[in-house]
Amino acid sequence: MSILKGKRILLIIGGGIAAYKSLDLIRRLRERGASVRAVMTAAAHQFVTPLSVGSLSGEKVNTDLFSLTDEADMGHIELSRSADMVVIAPATADLLAKMANGIADDLASTLLLATDKKVLAAPAMNLRMWLHPATQANIAVLQKRGVVLSGPDDGEMACGEYGPGRMSEPLAIVAAVEKVFAAGPTALPLPPGIGERPEKVSRGLAGKRVIVTSGPTHEPIDPVRYIANRSSGKQGHAIAAAAARAGADVVLVSGPVALADPPGVRTLHVETARDMLAAVSQSLPADIFISTAAVADWRVAATAQDKVKKTGEGAPVLTLVENPDILATVSRHHTLRPKLVVGFAAETADLIRHAKDKLARKGCDLIVANDVGTGTGVMGGDMNTVHIVDPAGVESWPQMNKENVAAKLVQLCAQRLVEAGK
Ligand code: C5P
């Protein structure tokens, strides 16, 4: 039995003399149990008719991007999604150029831009057109993007010349299509995090006050140099935004980041850990404190008034002193401890053990632990894989984008406040 049995092929027929061979291709594909939905470009109509294509495929032939009747029958996006694979035969120089450059000005080229499936192209054109550096550059781009080619073959051209540019024979194209299916899934997934549906945030924090810290801190060495870390602030800012959407009155205390202030949030901008502590302390009281910032553990004991110069007597020695621990300070506040205090533990090894440790040491109610080791892409990236650690145990969440981690965390905080009757 053929691997093509039950497979749905979207066949795009371009305008070239080889279009007559696409009729035979439809027959060969259907013989093997595949169904074929054909789309013809305007130029293809000069070589074959929709009637012959439709008769052989046994399905409606689509040609017009803006046809109201076609769109009502099956929208053009759906047309590209409902197929298992897209085959272009003949793939003209024009179609290949449009595809390489992302041009979508008719139904065929729009489908090629919108599809989420593997594409196989069977080029057919005059040999000089094929050999032209423009076509070769387009082919190189398309191959790099994963488009599979069948042909072109060498041979006699309709125009009388001899050389590369003849469309592959239908059976060779069928074999190439079979090879693509045999190689594995033909669907092209979206990049991680893109297309993820946002988690719903209910108004569970209406009337509550939330303080969030975010980003790195900068600890000056002299007027032009500082100690910092790779935190982008994406996770903390997303949490502040999610808390605001949940109805909370939110203060975001942010270190230096390249992000816009989230909407509906009062953002206080700080540089150093000591500034951050002061801003947080002044923003108390609050119902929830979420300490997402990657606060520098140390600062330079004596910041130089002027730029430190090379003296020729070796490197200067920087004496470091420990910064105040903002999370521990808020957790142990005698009078204004928020009802729920959440810390983060960004670790590169022994994640859960360190997180449990931190829970006790910092006196917070919950730790969100994440692995920020080299290669995880968490620091500065859009995705995060977190583990929620509290005295009762550990709950691991699947990898998701930082907006969804934020939304889930805010939901969890709202739930914890209710459970504790706070
Ligand atoms: O000890 P470590 O820096 O790994 O702890 C991380 C947690 O403590 C984070 O929630 C961070 O925001 C907070 N922290 C803080 N002040 C510091 C150091 C860390 O609030 N000086």
Image (cartoon, rainbow, N blue to C red):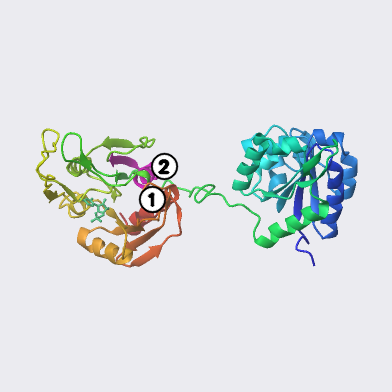
Q: In the image, residue 289 lies at what x, y percent?
A: 28, 49
Inspect the image, locate mark 1, and give the three-letter code of the amino acid beneath it.
Answer: Val
- Image quadrant where residue 106 sits: top right
Q: Report the magenta residues as a range.
A: 235-254
In the rendered view, does 255 fall on the left or right side of 185?
Answer: left
Q: Is mark 1 within 8 Å of ligand 1?
A: no
Q: Is residue 120 above or below residue 157?
A: below
Above or below, 399 relative to 156: below
Q: Quadrant of residue 268?
A: top left
* Rendered residue at 82%/60% (across/down): 32
Residue bearing mark 2: 245
| Res 83 seen here | no
**Depth order, front residue of 147/274:** 147
Circle 1: element type? helix
Give whichever of discs 1 and 2 has the lower sequence position.
2
Q: Amino acid at mark 2?
A: Arg
Residue 171 at x, y = what percent?
82, 55
Residue 385 picture quarter: bottom left
Give coordinates of residue 142: x percent, y percent.
63, 44
**Residue on which disc 1 sits:** 410
Name above or below for residue 85 compared with residue 255: below
Give the left or right position of residue 173, taking residue 390 as reference: right
- Residue 240 in magenta stretch: yes
Q: Image point 71% across, 59% down: which residue?
A: 179
Mark 1 and mark 2 residues within 8 Å of each other at the beta carbon: yes
The quarter of the rendered structure image containing the C terminus is bottom left
Question: Does 19 sit left or right of 393 as displayed?
Answer: right
SS of the residue at dot 2? helix
Residue that protrudes farthest toward the front in the picture: 162
| Mark 1 crowd level (few <14, some 14–19, many ≥20, 10 Å Cα) | many
Q: Is residue 90 left or right of residue 389?
A: right
